Amino acid sequence: MTAPALASAHVRIARPSRDLAAAEEFWVRGLGLSVVYRAEGGPEPGEHDLLMLGWPDASWHLELVHEQAAPVEPRPTAEDLLVVYVDGPVPEELVTRLAAHGGKRVASPNPYWNEWGVTVEDPDGYRLVLCTRAWSNS
């Protein structure tokens, strides 16, 4: 039996963060995402701060969490990617803005992403790829 799936299903990408303020600076002021939701936890185990980011009409959002009592250290690899297909040249001013807001441009170990995009690490070390191609599932 296969799992039911809908093409229109909303997707949440959840990750731990060392510093939600630094992450918000990168994703909102750098990339231009909006804060979809925010919640503050407390110092007790199991309580966590939460920051949800996305574009208003997107069918996905990024959830970043930080638990004060037991922080989870992000452990991204060079292949943990969030790819945004921009369907054209990546504006250099966008890459500069991402760097000014805590990002770091890096080379990808996968030559495909070096040829077809720009890779920028966020403050937690996760990689954002701005791909010059358009998405096509064919």
Image (cartoon, rainbow, N blue to C red):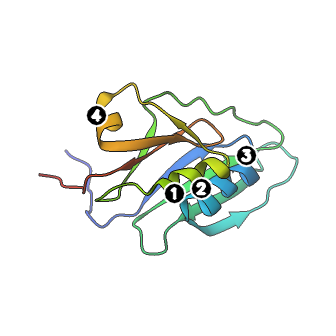
Say whether marks 2 and 4 touch (CB < 8 Å). Answer: no
Task: State the residue in front, 108 or 41.
Answer: 108
Q: Residue at x 62, y 68 (%)?
A: 35
- Picture quarter with the N terminus: top left
- Amino acid type of the residue that numbered disc 4 sits on in the rendered structure: Tyr
- Number of marks drawn: 4
Separation (CA) of disc 2 from disc 4: 24 Å
Q: What mark, if any, has residue 35 been given in the picture?
A: none
Per the model, the C-alpha gap separating discs 3 and 2 is: 25 Å
Instruction: Decide which of tag 1 and tag 3 comes sooner along the chain.
Output: 3
**Residue 5 lies in quadrant:** bottom left
Return the residue found at the far top.
Answer: 109
Q: Position of residue 78 (x, y in %)?
A: 47, 28
Secondary-structure class at tag 1: helix
**Could you tell me which secondary element the residue under label 2 belongs to?**
helix
- Callout in the foreground (2, 4): 2
Q: Which residue is mark 1?
A: 94
Q: For this view, does 112 lie left or right of residue 130?
A: left
Labels 3, 4: front one: 4
Mark 3 is on which residue type?
His
Percent across and percent down for residue 13 are 49, 50
Query: What residue did someone put label 2 on?
Result: 97
- Disc 4 crowd, CA 10 A, few/some/many (<14, 14-19, 20+): few
